[in-house]
Every structure is written in structure tokens, then in C-alpha cells.
Amino acid sequence: MQRDVKVTSLVWNHMDLVEGHQLQMTNNADKSRTFAGIYMHENKLYIIEGTVPAGYPAPALFQDSLGWLDENGVGLRYQTYYSNNYPAPPRVGRAGQAQTQGRIDAPGAKPNQSPAGK
């Protein structure tokens, strides 16, 4: 925020219920746009940033692409908001790991398996 930019948006946000902040900025010199996200999960700080030249589509998909993996490398989501300095809420169950989230090389995962397990 101390760059030569105009902050066009600063909001509280969450990714899979892990709370954080998102910023949108426009560079005063070249009019490029930067979208950034700042999150804290399990005492680790995550800062993601995407910048595009003036006139290009906003880097919103990049900003929204952040996700979390459990200890086995499988995508996770909490049942309620996760705040770093509080006990972690329960995680959403992954019944039979049929969801397509997470790494395909996670233990028990089968590449090219359809979401229905067929």
C-alpha cells in the first residue's frame, strides 16, 4: 500500500472460510492493476499478487485461485470461519474423497476418476 498506487478496494474476505484481506490497486504511473490477497493459515502468512498491464482484464481469477491442503495434500474447507489465533473449526467431510479437489497424487487418489467414483 506504500507504492505509487491508488487503492481501489480493500476488503475482508475468505478463501474456503480462511479469513484474510483482498486489495485492488491501480499504479499511478503506468495504470497497471494489481490484485492481492493476504491470509494467515496455521501460523503461515500467505501473500498472493497478480499484476496486469493497463487495458488488460483484471487478475481476479488469480486472486481467487488460492486454496488449502490438509496434511495428506487433499483440498480442505472448514465448517465455519477459520481465524489463525483461535482453535481451528471442524473441517468439511470429504465423503469417500469423491470430490475432485486436491492433488491427484494424494494417498488413495485415483487419477482420471470421475467425481461420482465411476
Image: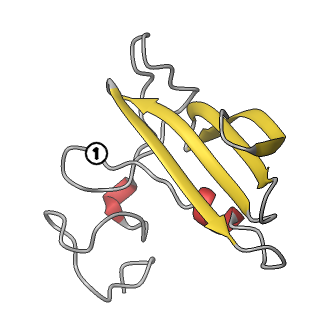
Does residue 9 lie above or below 29 as drawn? Answer: above
Query: Label 1 belongs to which residue?
Result: 70
Does residue 94 lie above or below 39 as drawn? Answer: below
Q: Residue at x 80, y 54 (%)?
A: 26
Q: Residue at x 72, y 74 (%)?
A: 53
Amino acid type, callout 1: Asp
Query: Could you say where residue 2 lies in the image, as x and y percent from the top left?
Result: 66, 33
Query: Could you say where residue 58 lies in the image, as x and y percent from the top left?
Result: 76, 68
What secondary structure is marked by label 1?
loop
In the drawing, does residue 28 fall left or right of residue 109? right
Q: Residue at x 26, y 74 (%)?
A: 104
Q: Residue at x 75, y 48 (%)?
A: 24
The answer to whether one can see residue 94 in this image is: yes
Who is closer to the viewer here, 112 or 25?
25
Using a 10 Å C-alpha cutoff, classify the residue at mark 1 as few (fewer than 14 neighbours), some (14 to 19) or many (20 or more). Answer: few
Q: Quadrant of the N terminus?
A: top right
Identify the image's colour scheme: rainbow, by chain, secondary structure or one colour: secondary structure
Quadrant position of residue 88: top left
The answer to whether one can see residue 64 in this image is: no
In the drawing, does residue 87 fall left or right of residue 18? left
Quadrant position of residue 103: bottom left
Who is closer to the viewer here, 20 or 6?
6
Q: Quadrant of the C terminus?
A: bottom left
Query: Could you say where residue 46 lies in the image, as x and y percent from the top left?
Result: 42, 40
Query: Could you say where residue 28 lies in the image, as x and y percent from the top left?
Result: 82, 53
The outermost residue toward the top is 86
